[in-house]
């Protein structure tokens, strides 16, 4: 058996929260976790100052039924099957979204914040590693750098970013040993970061988000 891959046109979507105005100071690219949809995920950011923050929520290219054949529809960024091509596809897709959004700014000076939640953390890390976009801050929320990340090749990219790792103290998918291992992993690879803990589960905590936004 022989596998052949082809590149095809595909319609993808992303969602925008708030309007671009003269008061806009921050543009956020926020990537959801496994089995979420961007139009719901983006609501986690509705308490950020609407005048100062423009939120862009791309959606994973793989949609599927969560259970059975008629339950709610969810999305994923990739699976282990043909993963390298899935990564290339979503990196190319995110680059197109970024270019479209940035072109609408018309050289307006804003800070670019990139946030990944859960599965979306690995997604945004691989995207930034492509070195096709400029960002000021990286927020890894309830997730981690992918373990196969080549830091020797990409250290310069990530050291330019203000990086935050955000984890709830009751996160049902991340235990304290994993938090410590990820922190040690970043320190070993000389990636500067700040660890932020909050009282909560595997979720975007809005108070923590608001506090974080003030420090970007």
Image (cartoon, grey):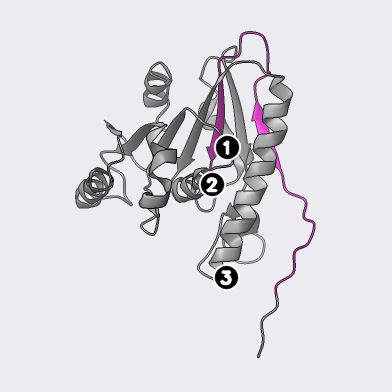
Of circles 3 and 2, which is in front? 2
- Identified at 65% across, 91% down, the residue is 1
Contact, mark 2 vs mark 1 (Cβ under 8 Å): yes
Provide the secondary structure element on which disc 2 rests: helix
Q: Which residue is more in the foreground, 28 or 149?
A: 149
Provide the secondary structure element on which disc 3 rests: loop
Q: Is residue 14 left or right of residue 213?
A: right
Residue 105: x %, y % from top left? 69, 21
Of circles 2 and 1, which is in front? 1
Q: Is residue 58 left or right of residue 47?
A: right
Q: Is residue 69 above or below residue 29?
A: below
- Identified at 41% across, 40% down, the residue is 156
The image quarter in which residue 41 lies? top right
The reply to whether residue 63 is in sight is yes
Find disc 2 in the rendering and name its residue. Answer: 127
Mark 2 or 1 closer to N-term?
A: 2
Q: Which residues are magenta?
A: 5-32
Q: Is residue 3 left or right of residue 67?
A: right
- Identified at 55% across, 28% down, the residue is 28
Find disc 3 in the rendering and name its residue. Answer: 82
Mark 3 or 2 closer to N-term?
A: 3
Mark 1 or 3 closer to N-term?
A: 3
Question: Alpha carbon of mark 3 to alpha carbon of mark 2: how far?
Answer: 17 Å
Q: Quadrant of the C terminus?
A: top left
Around disc 2, counting alpha carbons within 10 Å, would you say few (fewer than 14), some (14 to 19), or many (20 or more)?
Answer: many
Residue 184: x %, y % from top left? 21, 47
Residue 37: x %, y % from top left? 60, 45
Find disc 1 in the rendering and name its residue. Answer: 133
């Amino acid at each position: 058996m022989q596998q052949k891959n082809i590149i095809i046109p595909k319609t993808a979507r992303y969602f925008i929260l708030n309007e671009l105005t003269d008061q806009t100071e921050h543009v956020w690219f926020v990537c959801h976790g496994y089995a979420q949809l961007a139009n719901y995920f983006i609501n986690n950011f509705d308490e950020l100052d609407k005048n100062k923050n423009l939120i862009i929520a791309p959606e994973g290219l793989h949609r599927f039924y969560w259970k059975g054949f008629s339950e709610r529809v969810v999305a994923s960024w990739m699976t282990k099957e043909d993963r390298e091509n899935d990564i290339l596809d979503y990196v190319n897709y995110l680059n197109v979204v970024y270019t479209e959004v940035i072109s609408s700014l018309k050289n307006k000076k804003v800070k670019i914040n990139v946030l990944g939640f859960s599965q979306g953390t690995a997604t945004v890390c691989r995207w930034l590693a492509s070195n096709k976009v400029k960002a000021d801050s990286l927020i890894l929320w309830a997730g981690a750098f992918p373990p196969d990340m080549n830091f020797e090749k990409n250290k310069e990219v990530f050291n330019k970013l203000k990086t935050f790792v955000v984890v709830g103290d009751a996160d049902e998918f991340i235990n304290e040993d994993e938090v410590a291992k990820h922190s040690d992993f970043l320190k070993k690879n000389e990636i500067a970061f700040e660890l932020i803990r909050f009282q909560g589960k595997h979720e975007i905590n809005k108070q923590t988000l608001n506090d974080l936004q003030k420090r970007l």
